[in-house]
């Protein structure tokens, strides 16, 4: 089976076209040799795939006849990727989980709502009349004029 079809059939890539494009970009190798889409895959081959900035290693156990269900994938391949690669993936995902650096850009709707909840609406309820707020009454100004 061709390598692009194999990677698609074991659900490593969503479409065969995406699989072929990744192979053209030299992100797929069998052993240490970068391959073309037409390269035939055999049982026992170790395929190295660069995806999401991680180097995956897959050992071929069986060649499927066509695209298989997700539950059947472990029957056809064995993941022999280094644990360090998965730790790198976790680190990258954790570093991307920040919300926004303080002081950068204007507040979002979420930020504004959080600020409103923090400050509360008590201030607006206390000062409904501006004259009371400034300690003046409108009548005393008119009398002095």
Image (cartoon, helix red, strand yellow):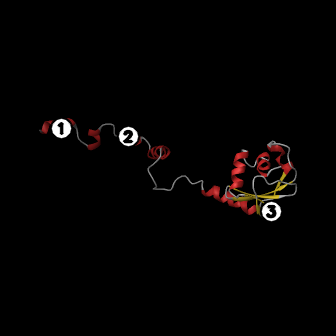
**Residue 5 sits above or below residue 83 on the image:** above
Of the numbered discs 2 and 1, the one sitting upstream in the chain is 2
Do the residues under discs 2 and 3 have CB atoms within 8 angstroms?
no
| Residue at image coords 80%, 50% | 2
Residue 95: percent from the left, percent from the top?
A: 61, 58
Name the side, left or right, on which 65 lies relative to 24. Answer: right
Of the numbered discs 3 and 1, the one sitting upstream in the chain is 3
Q: Residues within 10 Å of mark 3 (few under 14, many from 20)?
A: few
Camera-side residue: 117 or 140?
A: 117
In which quadrant of the rendered view does residue 81 lie? bottom right
In which quadrant of the rendered view does residue 88 lie? bottom right
Q: Label 3, secondary structure: give it.
A: loop
Inter-mark Cα distance, 2 to 3: 70 Å
Quarter holding the C terminus is: top left
**Residue 45 sits above or below residue 124 on the image:** below
Q: Label 1, secondary structure: give it.
A: helix
Q: Label 2, secondary structure: give it.
A: helix
Please give the residue where the numbered disc 1 appears in the rendered image: 140
Closer to us: mark 3 or mark 1? Answer: 3
Of the numbered discs 2 and 3, the one sitting upstream in the chain is 3
Inter-mark Cα distance, 3 to 1: 93 Å
Please give the residue where the numbered disc 2 appears in the rendered image: 124
Inter-mark Cα distance, 2 to 1: 25 Å
Closer to us: mark 2 or mark 3? Answer: 3
Residue 54: percent from the left, percent from the top?
A: 70, 59
Please give the residue where the numbered disc 3 appears in the rendered image: 31
Q: Residues within 10 Å of mark 1 (few under 14, many from 20)?
A: few
**Residue 88 sits above or below residue 73 on the image:** below
Q: Residues within 10 Å of mark 2 (few under 14, many from 20)?
A: few
Do the residues under discs 2 and 1 have CB atoms within 8 angstroms?
no
């Amino acid at each position: 089976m061709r390598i692009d079809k194999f990677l698609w059939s074991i659900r490593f890539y969503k479409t065969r076209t995406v699989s072929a494009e990744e192979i053209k970009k030299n992100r797929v190798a069998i052993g240490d040799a970068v391959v073309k889409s037409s390269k035939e895959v055999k049982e026992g081959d170790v395929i190295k795939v660069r995806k999401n900035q991680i180097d995956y290693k897959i050992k071929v156990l069986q060649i499927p006849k066509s695209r298989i269900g997700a539950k059947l994938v472990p029957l056809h391949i064995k993941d022999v990727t280094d644990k360090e690669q998965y730790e790198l993936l976790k680190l990258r995902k954790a570093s991307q989980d920040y919300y926004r650096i303080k002081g950068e850009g204007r507040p979002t709707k979420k930020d504004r709502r959080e600020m409103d909840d923090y400050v509360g609406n008590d201030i607006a309820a206390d000062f409904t009349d501006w004259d009371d707020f400034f300690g003046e009454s409108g009548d005393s100004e008119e009398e002095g004029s």
